[in-house]
Image (spheres, helix red, strand yellow):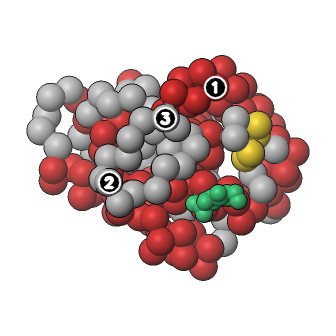
């Protein structure tokens, strides 16, 4: 998913969250500034989904980071509806692999990473099906929020996280801030 979303969401969360556990407060570094990774989603689509559902999704992410149960982020469902990436817990692996590969045009180092990460994440989402099913029955965090399915959000989280974790040295900016973000991604289960 577009990193603007993640970075702004997490910057806000960082202000908010008490340091109850080290994973509740992601470091401020911007994923996209730290690693040049492929992202197939169009900026205009991402922006439109964030405009519609950003507040809902921010509440969801904050709740999950502070130990709450899985929930669906509507920004991700909106992206998924528009692209057909995920339907419930069924990830369209071929479509996503093709999209990421296209976005990685001219950066062949990413191809094997995409080919292993996307199916792995799809398997994870499938394994989470019972939990995600429960999530869709929880009342929304804000009474006015729509309820969205969890599959798309977890798929996107997983894709961004695993691509970032596997970032080839050539595309990784090894600054103290980015290294801190990498440690966070490697040690926190839902690190960004
Ligand atoms: C996604 O599509 C489903 C089925 O048409 C719809 O019920 C849901 O509201 C849509 N979600 C978003 C976030 O637009």
Local packing at callout 2 (Cα closer than 10 Å; few below 14, some 14-19, many 20+) is few
* Residue 43, placed above or below residue 93: below
Q: What residue do we see at 64% from left, 25% from top?
A: 129
In the rendered view, would you say 110 is above or below 133?
below
Q: Residues within 10 Å of mark 1 (few under 14, many from 20)?
A: some
Task: Give the spatial CA distance, label 2 vs label 3.
Answer: 14 Å
Tag 2, which secondary structure? Answer: loop
Considering every residue shown, the one lying at the far bottom of the view is 44
- Nearer-the-camera pick, 81 or 47: 81
Q: CA distance from mark 1 to mark 3?
A: 13 Å
Q: Is mark 1 within 8 Å of ligand 1?
A: no
Q: Assign a secondary structure to mark 3.
A: loop
Earlier residue among tags 1 and 3: 1
Residue identifier under label 2:
143
Choose top left, top right, bottom left or bottom right for residue 78: bottom right
From the image, tell me which residue sits under label 1.
Answer: 129
Q: Which residue, given by chain and number where applicable, does mark 3 sit on?
A: 137
């Amino acid at each position: 998913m577009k990193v603007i979303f993640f970075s702004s969401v997490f910057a806000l969360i960082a202000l908010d969250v008490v340091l109850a556990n080290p994973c509740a407060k992601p470091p401020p570094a911007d994923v996209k500034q730290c690693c040049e990774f492929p992202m197939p989603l169009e900026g205009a689509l991402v922006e439109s989904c964030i405009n519609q559902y950003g507040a809902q999704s921010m509440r969801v992410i904050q709740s999950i980071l502070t130990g709450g149960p899985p929930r669906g982020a509507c920004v991700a469902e909106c992206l998924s509806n528009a692209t057909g990436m995920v339907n419930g817990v069924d990830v369209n692996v071929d479509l996503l692999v093709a999209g990421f590969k296209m976005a990685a045009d001219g950066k062949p180092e990413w191809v094997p990473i995409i080919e292993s990460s996307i199916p792995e994440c799809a398997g994870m989402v499938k394994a989470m099906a019972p939990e995600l099913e429960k999530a869709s029955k929880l009342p929304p965090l804000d009474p006015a929020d729509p309820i969205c399915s969890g599959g798309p959000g977890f798929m996107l989280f997983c894709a961004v996280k695993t691509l970032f974790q596997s970032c080839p040295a050539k595309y990784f900016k090894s600054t103290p801030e980015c290294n801190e973000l990498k440690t966070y991604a490697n040690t926190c289960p839902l690190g960004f």
